[in-house]
Image (cartoon, coloured by chain):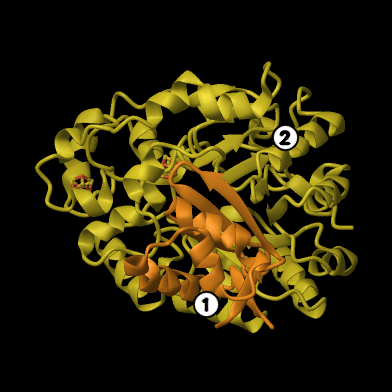
Chain colours: A orange, B yellow
């Protein structure tokens, strides 16, 4: 499984609905509409792979694929970067 | 999502900060009626204090404008101060001060972006709106930016009846300098109120613009044409009036308004000079709190397009004397025109603001 960290050029700001991420390089704004997803994004760099990050955030097995898809989208949007 | 955004955010997404009412041009549609500096404009120290506050609130970036913001002697220091505080800057300029050295400076950091204002794809069309020599000034700035290696800066056009036929030319012009085209809507704000009747788009032009935009999602619009979404599939963007919810303005004297297009007492929420500063105005002012309440669709209630258009732009309604809970003056279903006929006597009186006295035009010899 891939390990991720927050892109160094991304700022993250908590909001009532979750958080906003802004990328200073490509100047794109991304909405994170789920508090648990925000916790995962904030802590993902501390884990060796994304599964460990999901487990630590208490993601139920039934929701795992949805969270993985959300994380893949954040990777695509360059909010997250893959690391070795 | 739109509903949650409508209830407001801890900090604005789209914060415009006009640094000065001073300008070396006198564009006929200037939204802030700029010309002369105001003696009460924020001092350098006050500017820096605002930046500290924005950094603290984690405002990602500010849209700096004016007037012509680069005329302030402390402009470049302010830019450095923003970058140091990790507050990104996108500033709008007529290009007069974008020398090769300035262009280098802008290109040297990801935290600064620049937007060159242009209102015609040729000198004749542009200069009729922005003044003699202003086209050459903008093009020189674009050349300097491109030569400095600045990628994807913005060329910003207010779409009018006169230039709407040049959309492809604008796109080609921006492309020539590696820039992105940004189109925005003409609103009857500031001096724009004086020219709106003759320069705003006809219904037919609006329909053509809509199709043109749908086919070119790479063209930026700052969400300003969402009233056109009532014509079919929604344009990209949030499609709502963000005034006081995600949008606001800090003016040169520190007053905070709901949006850059409503410089009027009725939409003033407070001042960055008040106790609690900008954060308190944004989070707790009476005006912003009321703007975040669900608004009634009023006369738009029976319209099948309300979800897409939400009644359009508050500023456009206000300055044409229309009720705020009814159709936009440029309603694509024609409901604005009827309302305008009834409202023609109720337009709010707006003074000339900081326009140059006697409508003088300052010669463009100050390029350094
Ligand atoms: S008043 Fe008009 S310009 Fe201002 S935020 Fe609302 S829609 Fe946009
Ligand atoms: S009637 Fe109102 S909601 Fe419908 S298109 Fe016109 S302005 Fe928009």
Q: In which quarter of the image is the C terminus of chain B?
A: bottom right
**Which x, y percent locates residue A73?**
47, 73
Say left or right for B181 vs B24. left
Q: Name the residue under label 2.
A: B53
Co-location on one chain, circles 2 and 1: no
Say left or right for A83 vs B342. right
Q: Looking at the picture, tell me which residue is in the foreground, B340 or B43.
A: B43
Q: Looking at the picture, tell me which residue is in the foreground, A2 or B154.
A: A2
Instruction: Name the quadrant where ligand 1 sits.
Output: top left
**Which x, y percent locates residue B280?**
60, 24
Q: Quadrant of residue B19?
A: top right
Marked residue chain, label 2? B
Residue B36 appearing in the image: yes
Could you say which disc has been placed on residue A76 in the image? 1
Q: Looking at the picture, tell me which residue is in the foreground, B254 or B126.
A: B254
Q: Distance between the residues labelled 2 and 1?
A: 32 Å
Q: Residue sitting at 70 percent across and 76 percent down?
A: B151
- How busy is the neighbourhood of tag 2: few (under 14 within 10 Å), some, or many (20 plus)? some
Q: Residue sitting at 82 percent across and 36 percent down?
A: B48
Marked residue chain, label 1? A
């Amino acid at each position: 499984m891939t390990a991720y960290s927050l892109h160094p050029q991304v700022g993250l700001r908590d909001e009532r609905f979750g958080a906003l991420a802004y990328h200073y390089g490509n100047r794109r704004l991304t909405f994170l509409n789920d508090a648990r997803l925000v916790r995962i994004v904030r802590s993902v760099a501390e884990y060796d792979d994304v599964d460990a990050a999901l487990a630590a955030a208490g993601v139920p097995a039934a929701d795992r694929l949805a969270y993985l898809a959300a994380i893949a989208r954040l990777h695509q949007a360059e909010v997250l970067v893959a690391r070795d | 999502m739109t509903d949650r955004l409508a209830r407001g955010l801890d900090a604005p997404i789209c914060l415009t900060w006009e640094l000065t009412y001073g300008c070396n041009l006198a564009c006929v549609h200037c939204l802030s009626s700029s010309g002369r500096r105001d003696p009460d404009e924020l001092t350098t120290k006050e500017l820096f204090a605002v930046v500290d506050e924005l950094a603290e609130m984690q405002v990602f970036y500010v849209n700096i404008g004016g007037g012509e913001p680069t005329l302030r002697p402390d402009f470049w220091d302010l830019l450095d101060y923003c970058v140091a505080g990790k507050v990104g800057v996108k500033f709008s300029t007529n290009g007069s001060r974008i020398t090769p050295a300035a262009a280098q400076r802008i290109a040297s950091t990801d935290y600064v972006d620049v937007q060159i204002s242009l209102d015609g794809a040729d000198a004749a069309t542009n200069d009729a709106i922005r003044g003699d020599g202003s086209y050459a000034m903008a093009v020189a700035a674009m050349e300097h930016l491109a030569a400095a290696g600045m990628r994807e800066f913005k060329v910003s056009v207010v779409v009018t009846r006169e230039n709407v036929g040049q959309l492809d030319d604008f796109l080609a012009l921006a492309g020539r300098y590696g820039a992105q085209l940004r189109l925005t809507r003409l609103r009857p704000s500031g001096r724009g109120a004086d020219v709106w009747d003759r320069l705003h788009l006809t219904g037919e032009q609006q329909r053509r613009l809509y199709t043109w935009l749908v086919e070119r999602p790479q063209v930026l619009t700052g969400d300003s044409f969402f009233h056109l979404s009532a014509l079919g599939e929604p344009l990209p963007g949030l499609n709502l009036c963000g005034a006081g919810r995600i949008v606001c303005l800090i003016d040169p004297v520190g007053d905070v308004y709901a949006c850059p297009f409503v410089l009027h007492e009725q939409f003033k929420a407070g001042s960055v000079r008040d106790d609690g500063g900008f954060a308190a105005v944004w989070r707790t002012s009476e005006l912003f709190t009321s703007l975040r309440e669900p608004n009634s669709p009023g006369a738009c209630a029976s319209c099948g397009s309300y979800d897409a258009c939400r009644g359009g732009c508050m500023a456009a309604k206000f300055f044409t004397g229309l009720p705020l809970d009814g159709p936009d003056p440029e309603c694509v279903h024609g409901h604005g025109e009827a309302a305008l006929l009834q409202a023609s006597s109720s337009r709010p009186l707006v003074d000339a603001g900081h326009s140059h006295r006697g409508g003088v035009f300052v010669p463009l010899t100050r390029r350094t």
